Amino acid sequence: MRAELGTLESSVNHRFSNPALLDRALTHSSAANESRAGAGPALSDNEPLEFLGDSILGFLVAEALMQRSPEATEGELSRVKAHLVSAAHLHGVARRLDLGRYLELGRSEEMSGGRAKKTLLVDALEAVIAAIYLDGGMEPVRRFVAANVLDAPLGSDEEAGTDIQPAIANFKSVLQEFAQSRKLPQPKYSIVRERGPEHSKTFTVEVRVGKDWVGQAEGRTKKIAAQRAARGLFDRLRESGAEAAAQE
């Protein structure tokens, strides 16, 4: 049995004038199929809303990245967007919103652990995005995407237990492309510290671009630490407008 939706409305910061939209966004096809076979009213599943939400999300992420990084190249923007709309990242968003509690599932999905399935949670998140748009227009969904997708905590994919490999490749590549576009030296990475027991180490990775630009970050693996260091240094370089003068 799913939880009441009032708490979710507070979490997404939108009070629905048409609650049926949110209800449908959380209704999996397994529940809709079972309802059609029963004596009660038939339910509509969230698949059409998922389709719409995916397109809205892609547009809003692209729009925000253009506004936040007007000097970035197409390659830089594409790589960051790919991470932000990836299943790994969106799964972390859905988990933080605890969407699994609110899903309307058929008996088979309920019994097989559907409330924790990555695909179901990501699909429901995209459907909720569409429901907010249809209920309130673009501004409330723009605020939702900014707060929950664009500005999600760094490392949240890792903390949610998801596969963050796309993100790891992403920001190291973004930093490399940015350095090339500004005629800066290529980033160099080094492990500066390891701490903790063998089964639970924490690594500190340093990244350098030339003599003047240095960043460090920690992670439970070397790859995660390098991804975080690259992201932090990329943000600083972008904000500074660094040019070729920073070369060695």
Image (spheres, rainbow, N blue to C red):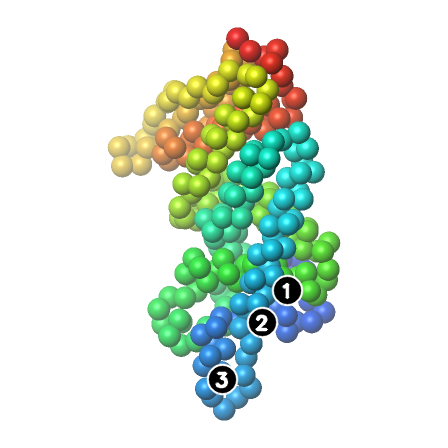
Pointer 3 residue: 36
Q: Is residue 43 left or right of residue 34?
A: right
Give the image location of residue 227, x and y in percent: 45, 32
The amino acid type, in three-letter code, at marker 2 is Arg
Pointer 2 residue: 24
Badge 3 element: helix
Cα distance in 3D space between marks 3 and 1: 23 Å
Identify the residue at image location x=41%, y=61%. Answer: 117
Label pair 2/1, CB-CB below 8 angstroms: yes
User: Is any part of residue 188 visible from this angle?
Assistant: yes
For marks 2 and 1 on the same chain, the one whose residue lies earlier in the sequence: 2
30 or 178: nearer the eye? 178
**Foreground label between 3 and 2:** 3
The amino acid type, in three-letter code, at marker 3 is Arg
Pointer 1 residue: 131
For marks 3 and 1 on the same chain, the one whose residue lies earlier in the sequence: 3
61 or 96: nearer the eye? 61
Give the image location of residue 110, x and y in percent: 40, 71
User: Is any part of residue 147 visible from this angle?
Assistant: no
The amino acid type, in three-letter code, at marker 1 is Ala
